[in-house]
């Protein structure tokens, strides 16, 4: 009998909502057939948290990036840090990253800058 293995492609396991429950979430996901969990960063402030989750839970895989909603607080030097994580810390994907114009007051030019310079 073949068992399906699912991949959760987007789980913010480092978010405060999961604090103290991360192990339980990972165990329940595995029991439900989720063999891999992709954990995206959203800003420079959580790159290391995402990296640490990979160390603690081998089935968690990092995706490093800056979400468009957070680039308003990003510094130009943050792009250098992101490049370091992308080249030295073995992500499975690049993300959270992109353009988001759903909310009108987000700075389009700033989003485009951080997207095109990573």
Image (tube, helix red, strand yellow):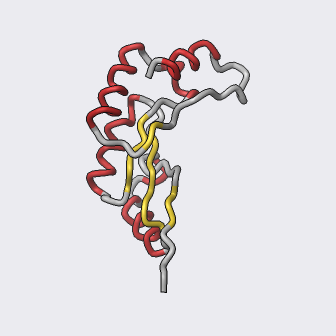
Viewport quadrant of the C terminus: top left
Q: Is residue 11 above or below residue 27?
A: above
Count of marks placed on residues = 0
Position of residue 23 relative to residue 68, above or below, is below
Left-right relation of 51 to 39: left
x%, y% of residue 91?
36, 42
Quarter holding residue 46: top left
Q: Considering depth in this image, is 77 or 35 the residue closer to the camera? A: 35
Residue at x-position 52% and y-position 23%: 115
Does residue 60 lie above or below 28 as drawn?
above
Q: Nearer the viewer, residue 4 or 50?
A: 4
Residue 13, how many percent across, how many down? 44, 51
Residue at 44%, 30% in the rendered image: 43
Question: Between 117 and 69, which is closer to the camera in this rendering?
Answer: 117
Q: Nearer the viewer, residue 42 or 62?
A: 62
x, y percent for residue 9: 52, 52
Residue depicted at 35% across the width and 26% down the height: 83
**Residue sitting at the far bottom:** 1
Can you give x and y, in whole percent of width and height, for residue 63 in the image?
43, 42
């Amino acid at each position: 009998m073949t068992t399906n293995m699912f991949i959760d492609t987007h789980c913010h396991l480092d978010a405060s909502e999961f604090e103290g429950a991360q192990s339980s979430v990972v165990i329940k996901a595995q029991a439900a057939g989720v063999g891999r969990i992709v954990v995206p960063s959203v800003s420079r402030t959580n790159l290391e948290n995402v990296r640490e989750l990979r160390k603690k839970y081998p089935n968690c895989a990092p995706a490093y990036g800056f979400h468009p909603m957070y680039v308003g607080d990003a510094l130009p030097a943050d792009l250098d840090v992101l490049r370091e994580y992308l080249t030295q810390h073995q992500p499975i994907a690049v993300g959270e990253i992109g353009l988001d114009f759903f909310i009108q007051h987000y700075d389009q030019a700033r989003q485009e800058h951080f997207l095109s310079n990573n």
